[in-house]
Amino acid sequence: MKYRKLGRTGMTVSEISLGCEHLQGKSYETVKSVIDRARMAGVNFLDVFMSEPQVRTDIGRALAGKRQSVMIQGHIGACWVNGQYQVSRDLEKCKFFFEDLLTRLQTDYIDVGMIHFLDKPEEWDAFVHSETMEYVRQLRASMKIRAVGLSCHDPITAKKAVDSGLINVLMFSINPAYDLMPKEHSLIDMFEGKALDFSACTPEPARAELYRACEEKGVAITVMKSLAAGTLLSRERSPLGVEMTVGQCLRYALTRPAVDAVMLGMQTPEEVDQAVQYFDLPEEATDYAAALAGVRMFADGRCMYCNHCLPCPAGIDIAAVNKYLDLVQLDGKAPESVAGHYLSMKATGGDCIACGACEKRCPFGVQTVKRMARAREVFGA
Ligand code: SF4
Ligand code: SF4
């Protein structure tokens, strides 16, 4: 297992973490076996959004005496009404089901208190001034939650939340299909299985702007939907029309800016074993570039951070330089943290000797020589 600092929260979490949603409806024995196997494999971060009482109770039982060994993302606003899951912003309901979460998990704190599933900019604007947001602030002040998060699928809403300075962690849906979602379409189109013509469209720029804002503000991203609900694993179901493996999807998500953990839904101990095998796979087995290179929409010179272009005679980590350059704002200003990361690299764009070897190897037609020169101009090295 590998670990990353969770933004500026002071927590350190496993790169592959456990999304517990598929444990709902399973027996206690299964819940316990999955959590035990995950902990043994080094997983130390769990997402518990489900409001269904039994799964909460079973996770709490499985963690009894081991609470300190894991960190939990628990959601505020996931409620259970008339035997069904429901999202609510109502203060009393949010309070009741957050306290229910603490009780059933047998704990008195949650590591990341996630404002649950808020996807509309106007809803965020209203929520900021609501009594439920005040409740979230009180939870943070009393250390019942150690950090504030938001779970969201919409980049514009998420960026508003990041820019507000009110959240420390963003749970966001990330995979190649969503990242290259044409701006003429929405995730709803994709969820509804509409045929999308990626090749004729321009990718939605709001997602890149969101990642840039997260880097700048030190907001950690925890990833949901890294497999696009499994559709990316099948050529027939994938909106991209190519088949990817779990390892390729994981590597894609883990190489996006600001991402610190992928919350992978695992429902058996065997699935935990398969997921953590990721760290033992050879580079070529997780090389998402190989799968995506044939997709027409990718042939537009966008860097996919795959490092297929190495080796570089100047020792430049080309993917990293490209990633930091993509985080620079349109006005050419680099967020301080991004500049710091860039300048700490042992070789930078300024070391490029313009040999062009990388461009011949890049499957995505990236004009790296120009981009290295641009990086030197922006970062001054
Ligand atoms: S320049 Fe091309 S090969 Fe290199 S990291 Fe970017 S997409 Fe991959
Ligand atoms: S063109 Fe620059 S970045 Fe590319 S391989 Fe040559 S020295 Fe490295």
Image: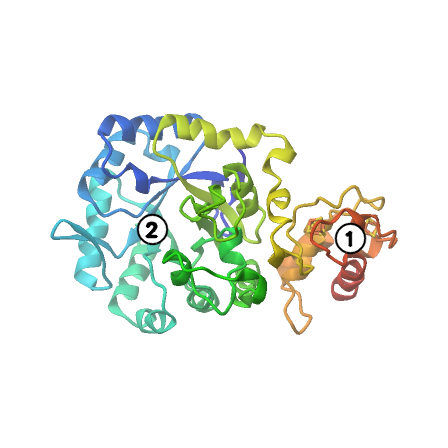
Mark 2: amino acid: Ile
* Residue 250 versus residue 221 in the image, above or below: above
| Location of mark 1 (residue) | 348
In the image, 231 versus 241, the foreground residue is: 241
Circle 2 packing at 10 Å, graded few (<14), some (14-19), many (20+), is many
Would the CB of label 1 be found within 8 Å of ligand 2?
no
Percent across and percent down for residue 98 are: 23, 51
261 over 353 or under it: above or below:
above
| Mark 1 or mark 2, whichever is nearer to me | 1
Instruction: Tell me how far mark 1 sits from mark 2, CA to CA.
Output: 40 Å
* Residue at left offset 32%, top offset 25%: 33
Residue 160 location, quadrant: bottom left
- Colour mode? rainbow
Q: Which mark is residue 45?
A: none
Identify the residue at horizontal 65%, vertical 35% (top origin): 284
**Picture layout, residue 335 above or below residue 149:** below
23, 100: nearer the viewer: 23
The kind of residue on which mark 1 rests is Thr
Element at label 1: loop
Q: Could you tell whether 20 is left or right of 274 in the image?
A: left
> Is any part of residue 11 visible from this angle?
no
Percent x, y of residue 206: 52, 67
Q: Is residue 314 visible?
A: yes
**Quadrant (top left/top right/bottom left/bottom right) for the C terminus:** bottom right
User: Which image quadrant for residue 270?
Assistant: top left
User: Which residue is label 2 attached to?
Assistant: 145
First in residue order: circle 1 vs circle 2: 2
Toward which corner of the image does residue 194 lie, by quadrant?
bottom left
Q: Secondary structure at mark 2?
A: strand
